[in-house]
Image (tube, rainbow, N blue to C red):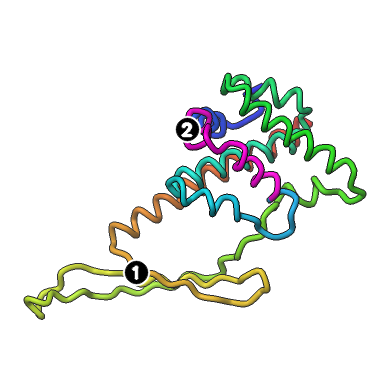
């Protein structure tokens, strides 16, 4: 069954199933995932609340992996029995398996009861986010207070222009050092590579179907 998913997703899913934060909050995370597949606007209240009891990195990682896993299963139109078998390859925690499979089955029954094409319209972009439209930057100089003629380091001002859910253009600005900027670019490259692999997997599955 695991050949249906990218190596990256399989690896991340294995990691999530061993994550103490997920094993403690799996029910809330999977509930938030399915809610956001169904609802028109982002509903991250559960996830935001979880950030008060765990690290933001753990919360975001667990949510993103489980959300991607759920959408992939739905894209492949797997039955809840197939999802159960698949999850058993990653964990022997019966409570986690039962909870996810139960919510997955409920979603399938809900989707089947709707007259609209819920799966087709929701799974490709299930959560509407602000859309990035432009990036502006300029270099600032930090002057040492002890020696006004000495430049201690360069600082960059980054302006992100985005269209909100109403279509209005807004700006979010932040300052960072060159090292921090390099770290940001590296993280964005990792994200782009992961998304690219997921898209390639979807295209392959579509052709095989």
Pick the residue in front: 123 or 55. Answer: 55
What secondary structure is marked by label 1? strand
Residue 169 as seen in the image, left or right of residue 41: left
Q: Position of residue 107 (x, y in %)?
A: 78, 40
At horizontal 34% and vertical 60% (from top left) the residue drawn is: 181
Task: Kindly identify which residue carries mark 2.
Answer: 19
100, above or below 93, in the image: below
At horizontal 47% and vertical 72% (from top left) the residue drawn is: 172
At horizontal 65% and vertical 26% (from top left) the residue drawn is: 97
Task: Kindly identify which residue carries mark 1.
Answer: 175
CA gap, disc 1 and disc 2:
33 Å
Segment colored magenta = 16-35
Pick the residue in front: 103 or 64. Answer: 103
Of circles 1 and 2, which is in front? 2
Residue 135 as seen in the image, left or right of residue 180: right
**For the residues bearing labels 1 and 2, Cβ distance under 8 angstroms:** no
Q: Position of residue 15 (x, y in %)?
A: 48, 30
Q: Position of residue 61 (x, y in %)?
A: 50, 43
């Amino acid at each position: 069954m695991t050949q249906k998913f990218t190596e990256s997703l399989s690896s991340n899913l294995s990691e999530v199933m061993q994550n103490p934060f997920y094993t403690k909050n799996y029910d809330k995370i999977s509930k938030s995932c399915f809610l956001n597949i169904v609802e028109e606007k982002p509903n991250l209240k559960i996830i935001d609340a979880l950030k008060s009891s765990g690290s933001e990195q753990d919360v975001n990682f667990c949510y993103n992996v489980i959300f991607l896993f759920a959408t992939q299963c739905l894209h492949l139109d797997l039955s809840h029995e197939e999802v159960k078998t698949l999850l058993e390859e990653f964990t022997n925690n019966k409570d986690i398996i039962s909870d996810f499979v139960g919510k997955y089955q409920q979603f399938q029954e809900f989707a089947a009861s709707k007259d609209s094409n819920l799966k087709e319209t929701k799974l490709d972009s299930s959560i509407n986010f602000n859309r990035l439209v432009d990036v502006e930057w300029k270099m600032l100089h930090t002057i040492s207070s002890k020696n006004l003629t000495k430049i201690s380091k360069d600082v960059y001002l980054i302006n992100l222009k985005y269209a909100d859910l109403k279509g209005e253009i807004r700006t979010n600005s932040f300052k960072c050092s060159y090292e921090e900027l390099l770290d940001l670019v590296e993280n964005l490259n990792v994200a782009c590579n992961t998304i690219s692999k997921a898209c390639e997997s979807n295209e392959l599955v579509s052709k095989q179907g």
